[in-house]
Amino acid sequence: GENVEQHPSTLSVQEGDSAVIKCTYSDSASNYFPWYKQELGKRPQLIIDIRSNVGEKKDQRIAVTLNKTAKHFSLHITETQPEDSAVYFCAASLGTGYALNFGKGTSLLVTP
Amino acid sequence: DSGVTQTPKHLITATGQRVTLRCSPRSGDLSVYWYQQSLDQGLQFLIQYYNGEERAKGNILERFSAQQFPDLHSELNLSSLELGDSALYFCASSPLEREAFFGQGTRLTVV
């Protein structure tokens, strides 16, 4: 199947610093790229998404960028807080639908 | 609470057995997706149904099957279970052409 590569697998930052997670995808038909946050033992929760006709989207401290030519997209979290600690997953749509291929996840730890 | 309900929350069964996982989507959502989450494979898409019809298929084993009923709830059937099938199984739902919301998952343990 089509792959989504996600880096890094773990990320540790100090409170107030920025965190960046990067993903690449292989399916040229993908046009929807969401990011999910998953806390231990809980369901993945959508935090931000971007569609292929948009290069960048921002929601408060979270921003996502998409480079469709290079097939990569990134999540940026600014002014990190301890409650941002969780596993973050990027995903790319299977073709033009909403079924998703997920990256392996990034475990983010924000230390006070 | 996402509005997607999955039952049971936990399930322990023996190898070789068959189980059924149930998902009730959010009110009005016609699409249901099933995902498997395990430590080694991560989050994997299994299958999608839209209004009772199969719409997309991912890495679903032949031992697994799903269906969506006229009331839009969905069931995932797992048969001839193996130890490696132990995982968290998530259902997600969405209106067509919109983002999906995940249920709380069913944790399956095969012993």
Image (tube, coloured by chain):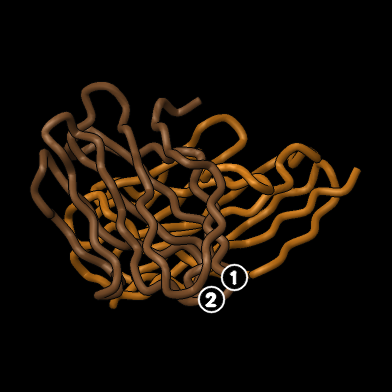
Q: Give the total number of marks visible in the rendering.
A: 2
Q: Nearer the viewer, mark 1 or mark 2?
A: 1
Indicate whether A100 appears above or below A110: below
Q: Closer to the camera, A110 or B99?
A: B99
Cα separation, mark 1 vs mark 2, equals: 6 Å
Q: Which chain is brown?
A: B
Q: Classify mark 2: helix, strand or loop.
A: helix
- Given residues A18 and A25, the one toward you in this image is A25
Residue that carries the numbered disc 1 in the rendered image:
B111
For this orientation, the residue located farthest to the top is B27
Quarter occupied by the N terminus of chain A: bottom left
What amino acid is labelled 1 in the image? Val
| In this picture, residue B54 sits left or right of residue A105 | left
**Amino acid carrying mark 2 in the image:** Leu
Q: Is residue A71 left or right of residue B47?
A: right
Give the residue pinned by disc 2.
B83
Upstream in the sequence, badge 1 or badge 2? 2
Horizontal and vertical percent position of residue B31: 21, 40
The residue at the point 50 percent across, 61 percent down is B37
* Residue at 27% over, 36% down: B94
Chain to which the residue tagged by mark 1 belongs: B
On residue B40, which mark appears? none
Q: Is residue A86 left or right of residue B88?
A: right
Mark 1 touches mark 2? (CB < 8 Å): yes
Chain that appears orange = A
Say if A105 sits above or below A50 in the image.
below
